[in-house]
Image (cartoon, rainbow, N blue to C red):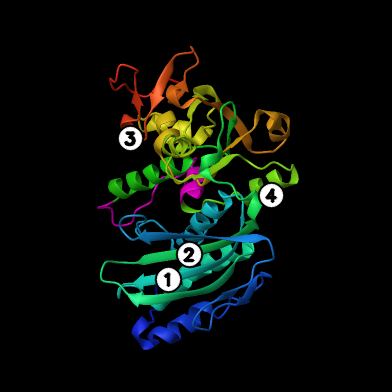
Amino acid sequence: MDQKKRTEIASLGQFGLIDLLTKEFSAKHASTTKGVGDDAAVIAPARGEAVLCTTDSFFEGVDFDLTYFPLKHLGYKVVTAGISDILAMNALPAQIAVSLGVSSKLPVEALQDLYEGIAFACNEQGVDLVGGDTRASMTGLVVNVTTLGHAEKKKVVYRSGARQNDLICITGNLGAAYMGLQLLEREKRVLADVENPEPQFKGYEYLLEKYLKPRPRTDIVEALAAEKIVPTAMIDLSDGLASDLMQICKSSACGARIYLERIPIARQTTALAEEMHTDPVVAALNGGEDYELLFTVPLTDHRKVEFINGVREIGYITKPELGCALVTPDGSEIRIHSRGWNAFEHEDGNATPAPEK
């Protein structure tokens, strides 16, 4: 953002601001009949398609810190979050609506940066901006994104379809976004009283990108369709592997076994975790905001899944009475609970540290 120029929002007014922020957006998706510029958007999906809808809210000071979060990256990330929810239903994103609560401390130029990131994500993913709202906020910046997607009704995937002996698969690697956040928070603390701060991020650029600019896994949903694979259950990894796996098990009334050595963790994640005296496995299980996909497929799809780049099989679905457990290399089982750093518990109910790698 250009620090030399500052245009007060009040000088444009609500409608002038909306016109300025949305003037570069145009409808490209076939199902968008009417986008920005009327009382409501008009969406006309193809015959036989279901319309999926999800909403995410982001609050300054809770979900992001503008001390180190560039507004362009924030714009990209809020779009990613909604798209990821749509992808987790085995659908493709089509439209978004963005509503803002804006504090007086932000000039027009800051919001233009935010919308530049939103536009970049929309263009990259083939998504139309079709509406939204802007209001004053007394508690900092608030961003609310509603995302619409379309899919054939019979191919929509829920969390509730996992069955015994299904394979548990994940995309990408886990824990990188969480460690990227820890790095940013560390540098913020260390440099709090430094006049000309120079944060030390060398060697950890990948972690920063995973936190600040996560990419939705549209490629995986398209690859599954190309292989004619319809997952039995799916969820996006926004709350951590432990919590999201348990959501599938709860909805599907099943248990699960995942193998410690099969959980993919990037080298930079492991390196920073060791530097900060934490366990990368805990980051992978409980960190969240990876926006990867966790899904189950029938055992008969094993060979087809193997050929999809970026997908790894990490375990299998069990009977519900067996619960959810992490299997260590020596064959012992540790129960999984979605409770952050207390996510592990022995069968006797006593808490235990994260398992050694």
Q: Amino acid at mark 1?
A: Ser
According to the picture, the residue beneath numbered tag 3 turns out to be 339
The magenta segment is: 192-211
What percent of the width, then of the height, locates residue 2?
44, 72
User: How much space separates mark 4 and mark 3, taking CA atoms?
Assistant: 33 Å
According to the picture, the residue beneath numbered tag 1 turns out to be 99
Q: Is residue 203 magenta?
A: yes
What percent of the width, then of the height, locates residue 265?
52, 32
Q: Amino acid at mark 3?
A: Arg
Element class at badge 3: loop
**Front one among 103 and 148:** 148
Tell me which corner region of the image, top left, top right, bottom left or bottom right, holds residue 138.
bottom left
Label 3: how many Cα within 10 Å (few below 14, some 14–19, many 20+): few
Label 1: how many Cα within 10 Å (few below 14, some 14–19, many 20+): some
Q: Mark 4 or 3 closer to N-term?
A: 4
Q: Mark number for residue 222?
A: 4
In the image, residue 28 sits, relative to residue 150, either above or below, namely below
Q: Amino acid at mark 4?
A: Glu
User: How much space separates mark 4 and mark 2, taking CA atoms?
Assistant: 22 Å
Q: Mark 1 or 3 closer to N-term?
A: 1
**Front one among 250 and 120:** 250
| Disc 2 and disc 1 in contact, CB within 8 angstroms | yes
In the image, residue 118 sits, relative to residue 345, either above or below, namely below
Q: Residue furthest top?
A: 330
User: How much space separates mark 2 and mark 1, taking CA atoms?
Assistant: 8 Å
Q: Mark 1 or 4 closer to N-term?
A: 1
